[in-house]
Amino acid sequence: MRRASREAARAGLSGLIVTPSADLIYLTRYDPPPLERLTALVLRPDRDPILMVPELEKPRAEHDGVGKLAELVPWRDGQEPYARLAKLLGRRGRYAVSDRMPARHLLGLQRAAPSVAFEPAAGVLAALRAVKDAAEIDFLRRAARGADEAFGRIADERLEGLREEQVAARLADLLLETGHDQVAFTIVASGPNGASPHHEPGGRTIQGGEAVVLDFGGRVGGYCSDISRTVAVERTPREFEDVYRVVQEAQEAAFRAVRPGVPAEEVDRTARAVIERAGYGDRFVHRTGHGIGLDEHEEPYIVAGNTTPLAAGMCFSIEPGIYLDGAFGVRIEDIVTVTDTGAERLNHASRDLRITA
């Protein structure tokens, strides 16, 4: 919180207002339920933090220890929380609000404090969260290790004859068995469904001679895993092996492009160049990667136009893909962290083509 306050002052801000979100967890480790009532952390340079909470939530906040980090200011149902918060902000100023603040809260603040300017807090908070410390990277490493094991175990099982939704349920079980606290998502896309990058697993039965995209993740200590592998069932479809090699080469080239000081977009450009040379440029339909931490998707985004220089401690996915409508898709994804000299993969599951039963 002190760092965030200092960065806010450096940006010319009067302070930050943070509502329940990964931002609040990052700053306080407090994760209240997503109620419609206002909970707001107020950080101002050279002043003690204040956390406005609904009175019925004060015991939970005290139990979670946030009262030791910030002064708790409760408000009761029937009171006007926005007017009370406006008094804390003062008559004028520039405050940055967390990106996940509900619109109803921001609109209420604007009405209660018409002379105060509000803007996004991402310029301060996203930059802080993008660079992980050793403890955060350890959580991400543990999450990646569990995801690797889950992939290894599902790839050893028989997929032919199962429905996508059955494989997705099995992946969820495996994530919990391999040390995850929560399951976040399980994408299982077989045959032509693999051409939809965010396919929702359904009742389609997996058949021999098809490719299956497996993309799944969960949380360990609040930090996320996210891995993608594409397998073939019994034998490979026509053209699949050539496409797989292109994606594998693009993923490796992008990984080797990572080092401190390199613009984030350069990693995307490197992966895309490999796929374009192979003639599949229009079939790579998404960015090369996204940051990961307390949120599955956060800064830095590995995409054209993002000139942010990479820095040691940043963690993100590298996940190029090729998607052929009506046929199959191929995606290979690892989480990596930037080191002082290059990059380290947090996922170690084999990226070589796997043919399963």
Image (tube, rainbow, N blue to C red):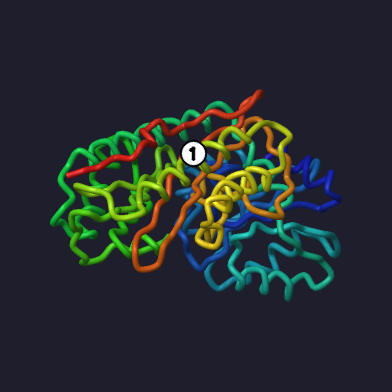
Question: Which residue lies at the image location 42% right of the left edge and 50% below the top edge?
Answer: 243
Residue for point 35% across, 68% down:
326
Q: Quadrant of residue 26?
A: top right
Location of residue 88 in the rendering, given as x and y in whole percent from the top left corner: 75, 58
Quadrant hosting residue 333: top left
Q: Secondary structure at mark 1?
A: strand
Residue 301 location, x and y as percent? Answer: 62, 50
Q: Is residue 61 left or right of residue 193?
A: right
The residue lying toward the viewer, choosing from 285 and 57, is: 285
- Mark 1 = which residue? 335
Residue 354 is left or right of residue 75, and the answer is left
Q: Residue at x 48, y 55 (%)?
A: 57
Please indicate, yes or no, whether residue 232 appears anywhere in the rendered image.
yes
Is residue 237 placed above or below 64 in the rendered structure?
below
Q: Residue furthest top?
A: 341
For the image, the number of numbered tags is 1
Q: Nearer the viewer, residue 291 or 236?
A: 236
Q: Is residue 141 left or right of residue 231?
A: right
Q: Percent position (x, y) of residue 230?
A: 34, 47
Amino acid residing under circle 1: Ile
- Label 1 neighbour load within 10 Å: few <14, some 14-19, many 20+: many
**Quadrant of the frame with the N terminus:** top right
Indicate the position of residue 194 as horizontal and vertical percent values.
35, 60
Residue at 34% across / 49% down in the picture?
183
Quadrant (top left/top right/bottom left/bottom right) for the C terminus = top left
Q: Nearer the viewer, residue 40 or 202?
A: 202
Q: Is residue 24 visible?
A: no
